Amino acid sequence: MMKLSKKILLAILMICMTNLAYMQTNDNKRKNRLYAKMELQKKPVYFPLPSKSFKRISSGYGMRKHPILKKNKFHYGLDLAARKGTPIYASAHGKVVKAEFSSGYGNYVVIDHDYGYKTLYGHMMVSKVKINQKVKQGAIIGFVGSTGRSTGPHLHYEILKKNKKIDPFSYWMSFLKKMEVKRF
């Protein structure tokens, strides 16, 4: 079996995630297809950057030597390198619960989704949303920047489940596996 690099897997994920909302279920009934689409829009499965603008994962989820603090710290998200000004998309329908500045995340947004999920988008050049604003999956919520504790333009992306930070890459992979099982 061929071993795929994280970069190739992420490229596959990006293609799948941006098209996932349009997948049809095995049941051809219109109501079930509509329900499946609505459920997909409530879960953080949409890739938060345009595929053409995404360059690489500059830092993954897990232990790392912090590039500014120069000490080992756990990194609770994915750093997705992209050009400054690249649009950032909401990965699911939800309600903005934070849109503020912190010394670490810089300009950042937190969106509360259904099923106990939240997503965090950090180091934005500028946010385009306000607290309590409802957003749809794929809506532009801001633009890539390098604010806060950052060494260059990128999106710091986190997924929280019941307020516990989880690995976005592992979440996407497990979601794809579940979807594949449901299709057959």
Image (tube, grey):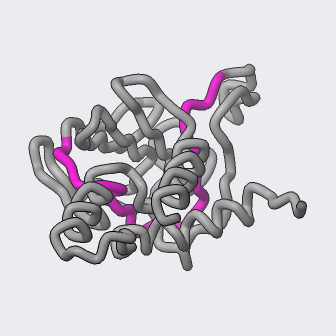
Specify whether residue 140 is in view. no
What residue do we see at 69% from left, 61% from top? 9
Q: Residue 39, how many percent across, how many down?
A: 26, 55
Identify the residue shown where x is 73% and y is 61%: 7
Left/right of residue 105 with respect to residue 81 in the rendered view: left
112, above or below 21, in the image:
above
**Relative to the observer, which residue lies in front, 25 or 71?**
25
How far across and how far down the image is residue 30, in percent? 19, 76
Magenta run includes residue 91:
yes
- Percent x, y of residue 17: 47, 65
Highlighted magenta segment, given as a residue range:
74-96
Asked which quadrant contains residue 11, the reply is bottom right
Residue occupying image coordinates x 27% and y 37%:
115
Q: Residue at x 56, y 46 (%)?
A: 174
- Camera-side residue: 4 or 98? 4
**Quadrant in the picture for the N terminus:** bottom right
In-image side of 60 versus 108 (left or right)? right
